Image (tube, rainbow, N blue to C red):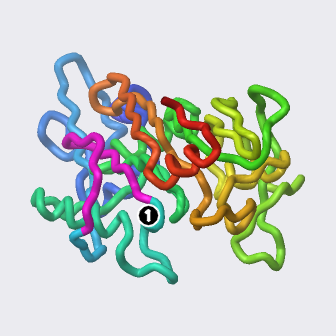
Amino acid sequence: MVKDIIYGRLSLSRGMLRRMKQGGGVFLNGKRDFITRRVKAGDEIEVVFFDEQTNLVGERIPLQVVYEDDFLMAVNKPPGMPVHPTGAYTSGTLANGVAYHYAQQGLSTKVRLVHRLDKDTSGLVLVAKEPYTLERLIRQRAEGRLRREYLAIVVGRLPQPAGTITYPIGLIEGWGVRRGHDPQGKAAHTEYRVVRQGKDWSLVRVTLGTGRTHQIRVHMEAIGHPLVGDPMYGREAEGFSRQALHAWRLEFTHPRTGKGVRLRVPLPDDMLQLLKQENLMLM
């Protein structure tokens, strides 16, 4: 049956098929048909996805595009830029910049962020240009096959060269958006490895096994080594007004080509200056 191919070989979700009622659909031998129809050798199945249009106002914001093709793009987000509009930030976001970037290409598709970064965290953000690519990348993320690695400067010298943090994370009542170690919270998995250690700070590589809000910030604070400069969980640093956290590496399988994609971006200038202060330079 058509549905066996749709749900099996193509691994489409039922939610995506439901959204096709608003546009697109499944076609058998050129004609729109039911997914319960039987198929035989030589039949051609075509899936046309419903592509929502953006309602964002595009803004001419400089973007550092690290990778781009017809299906997805990766952007190196600077610190201080929100990823999408919220009540507090209605313009000047990464999503506004992507909408403008799309418009220059003649696209009006919805801006689909595969994952997000805090406003003051810098680094790689992956954006899907169409719904099938988004669904496949989100599945890779859920299965741990979309690998995200960060560089962080943390307070103190860690006693072990590497470790795993699995404290569940939940909202702290009465503290707004602040999270913390909560036995009743959501499961969270973070792995870290020390790169360099100075007198007061350490540079660590951090890999996410899950993607909870503020996960790295909460987990490093929970083991007694909060991020340098973090105003919510860490310790402020003179001349540095954000958490010292940068999403420097991203690895995934391209949903359309099946090929592995590996992306890296260097540390931003402000974190490099911190490393110089502590004599932690990598090279």
Q: Does residue 192 appear to the left or right of 74 in the view shown?
A: right
Q: Is residue 224 above or below residue 9?
A: below
Q: Residue at x 78, y 76 (%)?
A: 175
Asked if one can make out residue 187 in the rendered structure from this viewpoint, the answer is no
Type of amino acid at the residue the image marks with label 1: Val
Q: Residues within 10 Å of mark 1 (few under 14, many from 20)?
A: many
Q: Position of residue 58 (x, y in %)?
A: 24, 72
Residue at 85 percent of width and 32 percent of height: 159
Q: Position of residue 74 (x, y in %)?
A: 34, 45
**Left or right of residue 177: residue 40:** left
Quadrant where the N terminus sits is top left
Residue 102 in the figure: left or right of residue 14? left
In this orientation, which residue lies closer to the viewer: 35 or 45? 45
Q: Nearer the viewer, residue 10 or 272?
A: 272
Disc 1 designates what residue? 83
x 35%, y 65%: residue: 95
- Residue 262, located in which quarter of the rendered image? top left
At a point 41% along the width and 58% down the height, the residue shown is 78
Q: Secondary structure at mark 1?
A: loop
User: In the image, is 281 to the left or to the right of 110?
Assistant: right
Residue furthest to the top in view is 41
Picture coordinates of residue 130, whole percent (x, y)? 29, 50
Q: Is residue 64 magenta?
A: yes
Residue 8: percent from the left, percent from the top? 43, 28
| Stretch of the chain drawn in magenta | 61-78
The one of 68 and 275 positioned closer to us in this rendering: 275
* Residue 192 vs residue 90, the one in the foreground: 192
Residue 2 found in image quarter: top left
